[in-house]
Amino acid sequence: MGRFFGTDGIRGIANVAPMTAEMVLEVGRATAYVCKRGRDHRHRIVIGKDTRISGYMMENALTAGICSMGVDVFLVGPMPTPGIAFITHSMRADAGMVISASHNPYQDNGIKIFSREGYKLPDEMEAEIEDLVVSGRIRNIRPTAEQIGKARRIDDAVGRYIVFCKNTFPGNLSLDGLRVVLDCANGATYKVAPIIFSELGAEVLPIHNTPNGVNINAHCGSQYPHDLQAKVLEAGADVGLAFDGDGDRMIAVDEEGNLLDGDRIMVICAKYLKEAGRLAGDVVVVTVMSNFGLHEALREMGIRTEVAPVGDRYVLERMKACGAVLGGESSGHLIFLEHHTTGDGIISALQLLAAMRVLGQPLSVLGRLMRAAPQVMINVEVREKPSLEEIPGVQAAVRRAEEELGERGRILVRYSGTQPLCRVMVESADEEQARRLCREVSDEVRRHLG
């Protein structure tokens, strides 16, 4: 792992290294430099952002850096991260850059970079950008005169993305008669999501759709679905859908107020796609965090699973390798490769609603296609992230837990790729056992790293 690129771009507290305006300017310069190579035309980079107050500062710094390298900038303003991927590819730009810290609190910010094809940059390109910045080499490369870039706003980007999303919903279906609650997390979906679902015929009840720069992800969205569950029950809605701050994740709530995570949604969508003859290879890519119950439910449907490391880029790599069209994470980061190059919360929601329409059952019934094994997870805040294999106390605690679980469960201990956290997850047929073992291992992690 590089010095500031993590599993999902660069992320940190805004105005604290590496997320300072000075560093962002240099990242813009280095990205522009790398994107110019090997192509003889006027180069362009798309910049979008979520609704954080620090986005204004970062947007201007990034624009200045890119223009100083002789590359033009297209500014699209607040838009979901997958919308930037779409616009980048649609406009034949050389790259897309998103200023967002996804599901993190408002004081954080980050940068995600997409290639001209709409995929996240490969590790080697991120490493090159990082080296240009850290070594200082990028500071000596300076175009002048007419070679300096220009910036302009793309006013119709939101409209283009709305049409793109709507086109992923089957043309012979509508959402007429469906009452849908949307939790927009006071983030990047606040404008586009209500329009998309209402134009397809749904009665839309939006919540947390008034961003003010500091309320993004604040006890709302996919990380905090309590308000969504309450609103679904209060309104007698058919379904509730929650996005995260940058709109690449989605989780759902059924009409009874029950929560459906990414695993349950994948099972429902896999059944829908298989019955429609569109589940290529009868395979779904999941991660090591996915519940045992998901594997069992898919196996009963004649669908096999491929397991990838945590992180949407690794899910996508495995999907491409095995020809899968569906993959994702229990967090609600789902990829429908028929429709998009990256995880898109709005598109995921539309596929789930299409499955409800085609399969003809309420979400509470479809949610029972998967019987989840009890799973307990504790996030431990850590000061640093040394290799867990080098901490004998943690390894001993993990071995004790594994021996006790035997074939009836599993334990997974891993660092978050985007936050200063170590995640301890235990699955067991006995929930009380899972809680106790998770607590014991977490205490050991905290003792050494907290």
Image (spheres, rainbow, N blue to C red):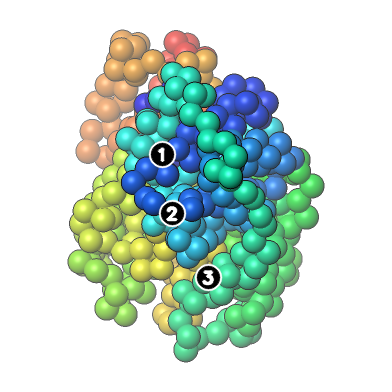
When the figure is inspected, residue 58 is found, relative to residue 446, above or below; the finding is below
Which residue is at a point 34% across and 56% down the rendered structure image? 327
Looking at the figure, which quarter contains the N terminus? Answer: top left
Question: Disc 3 residue type?
Answer: Cys
| Rendered location of residue 201, percent (x, y) | 63, 82
- Amino acid type indicated by mark 1: Val
Q: Which residue is mark 1?
A: 34
Helix, strand or loop at disc 2?
A: loop
Q: Quadrant of residue 5?
A: top left
**Residue drawn at x 33%, y 73% as measured from the top left:** 273
Q: CA distance from mark 1 to mark 3?
A: 30 Å
The residue under label 2 is: 41
Pick the front one: 303 or 60:
60
Percent across and percent down for residue 31 are 47, 38
Which callout, 1 or 3, points to the residue nearer the camera?
Answer: 1
Give the mark count: 3
